[in-house]
Amino acid sequence: MQHLPDPQPAPAQRHGPEPRSLQLAMKYFWRATMLHCPECGISPVFPPLSRMRKPADLFTPLDGCPRCGYPYTREIGYFLMATWAVSYGISSLFGLAIYLYMEYVLNSSLSAMLWVCVSAVFIFNLLFARHARSYWLAIDHFFDPHVGVQKSDDDDHGGGNVPRRTLPLPPAPDEGGSLDRPAKVAPAETMAPTSTR
């Protein structure tokens, strides 16, 4: 009788973010460079140019990944850091490199340097806007991943970076509460419906 080895247990399924590493950062960076979802790396972050109906569509990402469901925009103003930090930072370095090249290698005049640097940085910002948003998604996903968060029954804020409501609601005018001591109101789930006749 032949002795078979003990069956190996199935590998545990990952229910959370991968541990941070340089390899993971490079994977997210590559996905952002390709304008793909930072989580699955397959679906695009932006609609194709053929579906663009107005100029704003060029810079507006999809609501989320159609494949894995990863949300691209979490809140209003989410991409402001993409504009201020990523886009302006990289375009400033780009403009500085052009200036230094024109100043020390070409010995150009000041007016020529201004025209070339300003126009080059302007065009670069227009062309780099999609990538800046995609890089911001990758940076945010690397440092604050929002995958694998299990929602409990008493957790109504959805996990992630949406804060719990910690301040009490102000009293309704017909509840008899005052500003010093608000009236106690039962939660909406436990209140019985009232009939109006």
Image: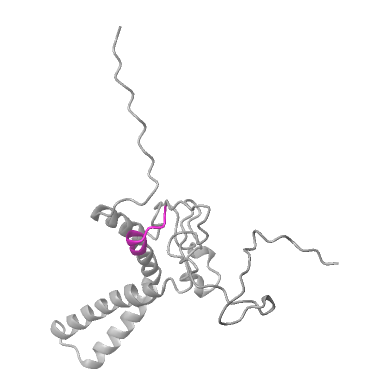
Q: Quadrant of the C terminus?
A: bottom right
Image spot of residue 84 (x, y percent): 35, 77
Residue extending furthest toward the top:
1
142 or 170: which is nearer to us? 170
Image spot of residue 32 (x, y percent): 36, 61
Residue extending furthest toward the front:
181
136 or 15: which is nearer to us? 15
Q: Toward which corner of the image does residue 12 lie, by quadrant?
A: top left
Residue extending furthest toward the left:
104
Tally of numbered discs: 0
Image spot of residue 93 (x, y percent): 24, 77
Q: Is 159 colored magenta in this rendering?
A: no
Please provide the residue range marked out in magenta. Answer: 139-147
Q: Quadrant of the N terminus?
A: top left
68 or 174: which is nearer to us? 174
Residue 67 vs 7, above or below: the answer is: below
Residue occupying the point 42% across, 54% down: 147
Left or right, 37 with respect to 120, comes to right
Residue 86 vs 62, above or below: the answer is: below
Q: How is the image coloured?
A: one colour
Residue 149 vs 195, above or below: the answer is: above
Left or right, 173 with respect to 95, comes to right
Residue occupying the point 44% across, 58% down: 44
Image spot of residue 56 (x, y percent): 50, 74
Q: Is 146 colored magenta in this rendering?
A: yes
Residue occupying the point 43% across, 64% down: 161
